[in-house]
Image (cartoon, rainbow, N blue to C red):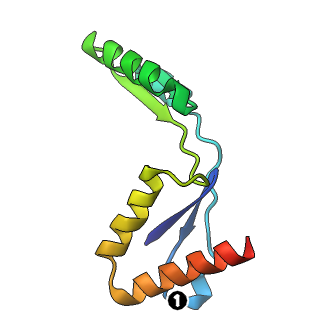
C-alpha cells in the first residue's frame, strides 16, 4: 500500500503497480482532532502557523508536565517547500529502489510542468 498526500486530502492507492487500481482512492474528510482529544480526555492544542510554533509547543509541554495527555494538531501546508517536505523527498528517494525513484521523479516533473 502507498499513501500520497494531496493538500487537504489524503489519497490512498490500493496497488499502484496494477493499472486497473490507480483510479481507486479514498478521500478522507476533515478530521476533528479537537473532538478526538475531548473523547479521550486529552487537552487539545492546534498549531496553525509558523508564528505559533514556540507558543503551541510550550503549551503542550506545560500541559504534559502537569500529567495531562495532549493532542498537538499541527497544520502542515505541503504545497510550500520547507526543510520538512524536502527532507521527506530526500528520505524517500534514498530508501526506494531505482525504478520507484524514476517513477517518483517523473511524476514530480509532470506535476511541475502541468501545474
Residue 52: give x, y in percent of width and height. 52, 24
Residue at image x 73%, y 70%?
A: 115
In the orientation shown, which residue stands out farthest toward the right?
114
In the orientation shown, which residue stands out farthest toward the top?
66
Can residue 55 be seen here? The reply is: yes
Residue at image x 63%, y 54%?
A: 7
Please, is residue 23 above or below residue 25 in the view? below
Q: In the image, is 14 to the left or to the right of 30?
A: left
Please, is residue 67 above or below residue 77 in the view? above
Disc 1 crowd, CA 10 A, few/some/many (<14, 14-19, 20+): few
Describe the element under mark 1 as helix, strand or loop: loop
Of residues 79 and 20, the one drawn nearer to the viewer in this rendering: 79
Q: Which residue is mark 1?
A: 18
Can residue 23 be seen here? The reply is: no
Q: Quadrant of the N terminus?
A: bottom left
Of residues 81 and 58, the one drawn nearer to the viewer in this rendering: 81
Where residue 43 sits, quadrant-wise, is top left
Where residue 23 sits, quadrant-wise, is bottom right
Q: In the image, is 1 to the left or to the right of 31?
A: left
Residue at image x 57%, y 75%?
A: 108
Amino acid at each position: 500500500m502507498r499513501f500520497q498526500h494531496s493538500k487537504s486530502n489524503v489519497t490512498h492507492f490500493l496497488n499502484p503497480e496494477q493499472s486497473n487500481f490507480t483510479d481507486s482512492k479514498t478521500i478522507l474528510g476533515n478530521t476533528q482532532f479537537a473532538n478526538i482529544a475531548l473523547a479521550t480526555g486529552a487537552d487539545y492544542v492546534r498549531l496553525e502557523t509558523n508564528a505559533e510554533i514556540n507558543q503551541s509547543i510550550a503549551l503542550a509541554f506545560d500541559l504534559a508536565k502537569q500529567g495531562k495527555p495532549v493532542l498537538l494538531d499541527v497544520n502542515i501546508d505541503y504545497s510550500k517547500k520547507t526543510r520538512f517536505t524536502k527532507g521527506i523527498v530526500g528520505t524517500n528517494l534514498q530508501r526506494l529502489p531505482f525504478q520507484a525513484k524514476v517513477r517518483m521523479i517523473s511524476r514530480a516533473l509532470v506535476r511541475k510542468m502541468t501545474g
